[in-house]
Image (cartoon, rainbow, N blue to C red):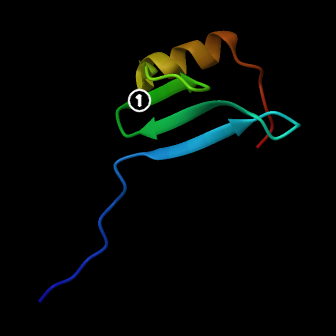
Amino acid sequence: MNNRFQSEKYHDHRIVAEDGSVVGHIRVKPSGILWAPKSAKVWFGLTLARFGEVMEREGKRQKK
Protein backbone atom coordinates (compact mmCIF):
# COMPACT_ATOMS: atom_id res chain seq x y z
CA MET A 1 0.00 0.00 0.00
CA ASN A 2 1.33 3.42 -0.95
CA ASN A 3 -0.25 6.05 1.34
CA ARG A 4 0.20 9.77 0.76
CA PHE A 5 -0.99 13.13 2.01
CA GLN A 6 -3.65 14.75 -0.14
CA SER A 7 -3.19 18.46 -0.90
CA GLU A 8 -5.89 20.89 0.19
CA LYS A 9 -8.14 22.20 -2.58
CA TYR A 10 -8.43 25.58 -0.81
CA HIS A 11 -7.55 27.43 2.38
CA ASP A 12 -10.19 29.42 4.24
CA HIS A 13 -9.38 32.38 6.46
CA ARG A 14 -11.86 34.10 8.76
CA ILE A 15 -11.49 37.88 8.99
CA VAL A 16 -12.40 39.30 12.38
CA ALA A 17 -12.72 42.82 13.78
CA GLU A 18 -10.86 44.00 16.88
CA ASP A 19 -13.83 42.96 19.04
CA GLY A 20 -13.68 39.41 17.63
CA SER A 21 -16.78 39.67 15.46
CA VAL A 22 -16.57 38.06 12.03
CA VAL A 23 -16.29 40.52 9.12
CA GLY A 24 -16.04 37.97 6.32
CA HIS A 25 -14.10 35.06 4.85
CA ILE A 26 -11.38 34.71 2.24
CA ARG A 27 -10.84 31.46 0.36
CA VAL A 28 -7.52 30.97 -1.45
CA LYS A 29 -7.66 28.43 -4.28
CA PRO A 30 -5.08 27.48 -6.92
CA SER A 31 -7.25 29.26 -9.51
CA GLY A 32 -8.22 32.42 -7.63
CA ILE A 33 -9.23 34.33 -4.52
CA LEU A 34 -12.81 34.37 -3.17
CA TRP A 35 -14.45 36.73 -0.67
CA ALA A 36 -17.67 36.19 1.29
CA PRO A 37 -19.07 38.85 3.63
CA LYS A 38 -20.26 37.77 7.08
CA SER A 39 -23.28 35.42 6.93
CA ALA A 40 -23.31 35.47 3.10
CA LYS A 41 -24.24 32.45 1.05
CA VAL A 42 -22.54 33.86 -2.06
CA TRP A 43 -18.83 34.19 -2.79
CA PHE A 44 -17.24 36.90 -4.94
CA GLY A 45 -14.07 35.94 -6.76
CA LEU A 46 -11.17 37.01 -8.94
CA THR A 47 -8.76 34.90 -10.94
CA LEU A 48 -5.17 35.07 -9.70
CA ALA A 49 -4.21 37.12 -12.77
CA ARG A 50 -7.01 39.64 -12.14
CA PHE A 51 -6.24 39.71 -8.41
CA GLY A 52 -2.61 40.56 -9.23
CA GLU A 53 -3.71 43.40 -11.53
CA VAL A 54 -6.02 44.86 -8.89
CA MET A 55 -3.37 44.61 -6.15
CA GLU A 56 -0.69 46.26 -8.28
CA ARG A 57 -3.06 49.06 -9.25
CA GLU A 58 -4.87 49.63 -5.93
CA GLY A 59 -2.75 47.93 -3.26
CA LYS A 60 -0.38 49.70 -0.92
CA ARG A 61 3.30 48.73 -1.31
CA GLN A 62 4.43 46.61 1.65
CA LYS A 63 7.75 45.45 3.04
CA LYS A 64 8.08 41.67 3.43
Q: Of helix, strand and loop, which one carries label 1?
A: strand
Q: Residue 45: where, in percent of width, then height?
A: 44, 20
As drawn, 23 above or below 29: above
Displayed quadrant of residue 23: top right
| Residue lying at 51% horizontally and 20% vertically, measured from the top left | 51
- Horizontal arrangement in the rendering, residue 37 relative to residue 19 (left or right): left
Q: Residue 18: where, in percent of width, then height?
A: 88, 36
Q: Residue furthest bottom?
A: 1
Displayed quadrant of residue 21: top right
Q: Residue furthest left?
A: 1
Q: Nearer the viewer, residue 22 or 8?
A: 22
| Residue lying at 47% horizontally and 29% vertically, measured from the top left | 33
Quarter of the image that includes the C terminus: top right
Q: Nearer the viewer, residue 58 or 8?
A: 8
Image mark count? 1
Q: Residue 10: where, in percent of width, then height?
A: 41, 46
Q: Residue furthest right?
A: 18
Which residue position holds label 1?
Answer: 32
| Residue lying at 44% horizontally and 22% vertically, measured from the top left | 43
- Horizontal arrangement in the rendering, residue 51 relative to residue 30 (left or right): right
As drawn, 52 above or below 2: above
Three-letter code for the amino acid on which mark 1 is drawn: Gly
Quarter of the image that includes the N terminus: bottom left
Q: Residue furthest front?
A: 39
Callout 1 crowding tier (Cα within 10 Å): few <14, some 14–19, many ≥20? some
Q: Residue 37: where, in percent of width, then height?
A: 59, 22
- Horizontal arrangement in the rendering, residue 47 relative to residue 59 (left or right): left
